[in-house]
Amino acid sequence: DMFLPWATECAAKFNIPRLIFHGISFFAHCTKDMIMVYQPYKHVSSDEDPFVIPYFPNEITLTRSQIPEDLMKHEQSELKKRHEKIQESELQCYGVIVNSFYELEPDYVDFFKKKLGRRAWHIGPVSSCNKSLKDKAQRGGGEASMNEHECLKWLNLRKPNSVIYICFGSLANFIVPQLQEIAKALEALEYDFIWVLRDDRITKNEEWLPLGFRKRTQGKGLLIGGWVPQVLILEHEATGAFVTHCGWNSTLEAISAGIPMVTWPLFAEQFYNEKLVNHILKIGTPVGAKKWKAVHSIEDVVEHNDIEKAIKDIMEGDETQAMRNRAKNLKEMARKAMEEGGSSY
């Protein structure tokens, strides 16, 4: 585990090679390293001005507002010290294991190995190891808030590619005005939806919802608090798009299921993943998030009009069919990568 840097010293003491498992993509790893080494953010005059990641195979731009504040701080915060220990530990270890597959990001697998000089093995998508319905339903270790059979039964009544799946992972904690904007967008749109929220939003009173929202969307949408069988939802033929925070596990699960994404990055390396999805793989469209946030301070609000537009673009826009075709091709590549003789076998 990359978050246990002390293990490198212990392994070296007993002359045991140590491999680090990274929970991020090759692309995100390369982006992070190039930002740390070359500091391209210093060459722009404002937080909103784009800078180019140097030496990349593709022209990728970011802004200072989209990268972790810790990367740009001169003072040694506790978080920065921790990241530096992780980086130092990685450079001393034997190699890195990554949840990805070669065909997904070949230029950045090669960049990581050849340009950055790291040993690395791609072993993903690891979600493909879950073969049975039960294993897929329990992936991630959580107890599903809704029985997977109930969820699938609801999806079985919907047409192919007709349902929007909205989930921002277990850490994101939106403020009430943002939740209300999402609710307004979902009500205005004609698509069925599954909206997953933190459990405390469902178990407490629901004053944060627009008055009458549940009644007006009855039969059209499911609101679920807590854990859901995400892999099963993404793999279902009724699911047409995934509104996601671009966490790597969720992103790769969507890729493995052949589902286009509305990207809404929040923190960690999620803005990097958004660039991979939208600019390199071309299987997503951005909702318009512009600022990196700490996990518990997601206060910037994306307006409902922007949410509606992004969802419409991915469900019935000019590029919808092309995106679906690319997503299906990546799904097939992911499947083959895990088979005997595949790049991750």
Image (cartoon, rainbow, N blue to C red):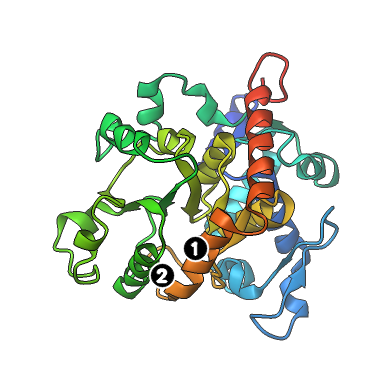
Asked if residue 80 lies left or right of residue 141, the reply is: right
For the residue pair 249 and 98, the one nearer the viewer reads as 249
- Distance, label 1 to label 2, CA atoms, is 8 Å
* Camera-side residue of 163 and 178: 163
Quadrant of the image for the C terminus? top right
Q: Are marks 1 and 2 in contact (CB under 8 Å)?
A: yes
Residue drawn at x 46%, y 42% as measured from the top left: 239
Q: Is residue 148 left or right of residue 241?
A: left
> Amino acid type of disc 1?
Leu
The image quarter containing residue 213 is bottom left
- The answer to whether residue 154 is above or below residue 244 is above
Camera-side residue of 241 and 275 = 241
| Visible residue check, residue 3 | no
Residue 59 position in % (x across, y down) = 81, 61
The kind of residue on which mark 2 rests is Ile
> Which residue in the rendered view is the most extreme toward the bottom?
45
Mark 1 lies on a secondary structure that is: loop
**Label 2 SS:** loop
Residue 179 horizontal/vertical position (percent): 33, 67
Residue at which label 2 appears: 298
Rendering coords of residue 122 (x, y %): 67, 31
Give me the disc on residue 266.
1
Q: Residue furthest top?
A: 340
